[in-house]
Amino acid sequence: MLDSGTPTRLGMWAVVAAIAVLALLGWQLRTPQVPPEVTDTPVVAAPEPPGEPAAEPLPAEWGVDNVAEVTFVDDLHGFAVLQRCSSAVRWCGRRLLTTTDAGATWEAVRWLPTMADGYNRLMAPSFDELMLLDVDTLADVVRSTDGGRSWVRLPVERADPLPLAAAGVLVLGGPVICNRDCEPTTVSWFDPATLLLHPLPTQPSAEELARSQSTTASRVDGDIVVGGTTLTGAYVAFSRDSGRTWSQSRLNPELGTGHAVMHADVRAAGGGRAYAFVQIDDGIGGPSTLGYRSDDGGASWLPLPLQRQPFVWPPLALLEGELLVTDLSGHLYLSISGGTSWAQVESPGDLWITQNAPGETMVGTVWGAEAVQTHYFSRDGHTWAPMRLPD
């Protein structure tokens, strides 16, 4: 992200270092340090004139802008969040953008209020109604009913268990990261229509999740996949019916002396398919990633030949059951037959891709000389449209 030139072929350690910098920067941007004088922000944020918050300069290494996400209401209308760190402000401001021509041009609506700091998931149920969610806690939401010109913070109420609805947002409650003997994670979903949080009617194995070091979850339609990690393997729970029943299994990779499982990332892909990516630490700083795929709702898992591919794992996006990844040179590839073979995809450059959930619109960023960024979006991974952002 901070490279001053166009990326070229890099060594593995350079890529690992770059990803670490991106992760650290992303964490800093995701949890901005709000200064004391704005801690008691009013609950309601009224419309405000254009302009940036004026404050002290940020460190030079934070001097980047980033399109955090793009979401469309229909084929023509959509919204984006532009995170602005290049301006001389004490913390990174976020600007809400809108398009009415399928993303060909974008206009600024306003700066998001500081009471929305830390709310990182943008939802647009309609062209007028928008919501910002903090899916890690989801104690409340920040909502607009006038297309993002004014905002109000509203509480989220806990409600009775229900199966996951089509428009629901999957939420993990309880310890997402745990050392040992923790309370089990509760899988729930948020209903944007009622602002209610519903636990699923049944939960994955409490015993397994209580022993997990970390927990992740993913959904596509009625398929839900929940994964937990131990030092020796990964636990995966799969529901094909929106949380009514579960199929549960363990992935036990062959580990050498001093090896341990660091993390497991599970991804629902729809139609009974799911992926699991298990990261192994060899004890001397040489991590590797093992991949698995299930096509039968988690009843069985097949190993994927990831180590024979020069890709940076885990994948950057999931599209119609297939994986979208980049290699060490920034080339873009889409998997065929569930990750068993690969086809290169045309791209406008060495893209860094983000996607909020499987199947959703992707944002691609290309870094040029002096950290100049060009942003693109795509709905299918093949066609990347440039984002003409406002000055």
Image (spheres, grey):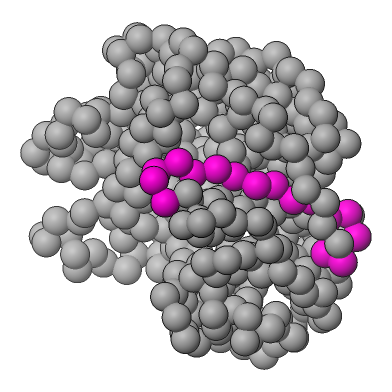
Q: Residue at x 52, y 66 (%)?
A: 231
Residue 366 x, y percent position in the rendering: 48, 19
Q: Classify 102 as above or below 385.
A: below
Quarter of the image with the N terminus in it = top left
Residue 89 x, y percent position in the rendering: 17, 37
Left or right of residue 219, residue 59 in this image: left
Q: Residue furthest bottom?
A: 160
Nearest the eye: 9 or 368: 9
Q: Residue furthest front?
A: 257
Q: Is residue 297 magenta?
A: yes
Residues shaded magenta: 283-299
Residue 211 x, y percent position in the rendering: 54, 80
Quarter holding residue 201: bottom right
Nearest the eye: 122 or 219: 219
Q: Residue at x 65, y 31 (%)?
A: 325
Total marks shown come to 0
For the question of whether residue 33 can be seen, the reply is yes
Q: Classify 256 as above or below 386.
A: below
